[in-house]
Image (tube, rainbow, N blue to C red):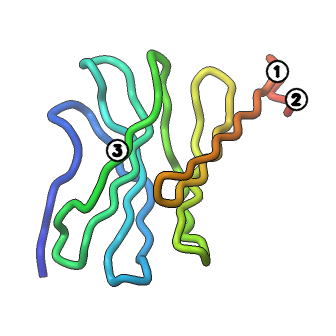
Amino acid sequence: MWTRTYGTTGVDFGYAVVSTIDGGWALAGSITVSGQSLNMMLTKIDDDGDIIWERSYGGSNVDEAFGLQYTSDGGFLWAGARFPGEFTARYVHGSHEQLRRHSLDTAFRYR
């Protein structure tokens, strides 16, 4: 049994965790960047809780990852939001990545 803390010294959020076929785990959430904005964060850890790799995505807006799915090909599909008004879905497998963004209009309708 172990306990670990991941993230920065800022205000960080963990929203999703999934087990992986290699016995490790993947964590999705958001980390504080430059003391003010949030970036989406995906962290892969082994069964001892040691970090294997981390990926952070975002910019000057608030980007948060809320959902995470481990795919049958060993990749990760994670979903989140970029505020204001965009839904984000990102697929990651090794060095391959795909990003999809969809916006909402002012009445919160999908466009």
Q: Whole-percent x and y of residue 6?
A: 21, 51
Q: Is mark 3 on a helix, strand or loop?
A: strand
Marked residue nearer the N-terminal end (2 or 1):
1
How far, Cα to Cα, is label 2 from label 1?
7 Å
* Residue carrying label 2: 111
Q: Which residue is drawn at 39% across and 28% down?
A: 38
Q: Which of marks 2 and 1 is in front?
A: 2
- Which is more toward the observer, 95 or 105? 95
Q: Is mark 1 on a helix, strand or loop?
A: loop
Marked residue nearer the N-terminal end (3 or 1):
3
How far, Cα to Cα, is label 2 from label 3?
28 Å
* Residue 7, above or below 69: above
- Which is more toward the observer, 41 or 55? 55
The answer to which image quadrant residue 52 occupies is: bottom left
- Residue type beneath disc 2: Arg
Marked residue nearer the N-terminal end (2 or 3):
3
Q: Residue at x 47, y 28 (%)?
A: 58
* Residue carrying label 3: 13
* Residue carrying label 1: 105
Q: Whole-percent x and y of residue 36?
A: 31, 17
**Is disc 2 in contact with disc 1, using a CB cutoff of under 8 Å?**
yes
- Residue type beneath disc 1: Asp
The quarter in which the N terminus is drawn is: bottom left
Q: Which residue is drawn at 49% across and 19% down?
A: 61
The quarter in which the C terminus is drawn is: top right
Query: Viewed as shown, does residue 49 lie left or right of 95?
Result: left
The label number, if any, that marks residue 80 in the structure image: none
User: How dense is the environment of label 3, judged by Cα within 10 Å: few (below 14), some, or many (20 and up)?
Assistant: some
Q: Which of marks 2 and 3 is in front?
A: 2
Q: Is mark 2 on a helix, strand or loop?
A: loop
Query: Viewed as shown, does residue 57 lie left or right of 36?
Result: right
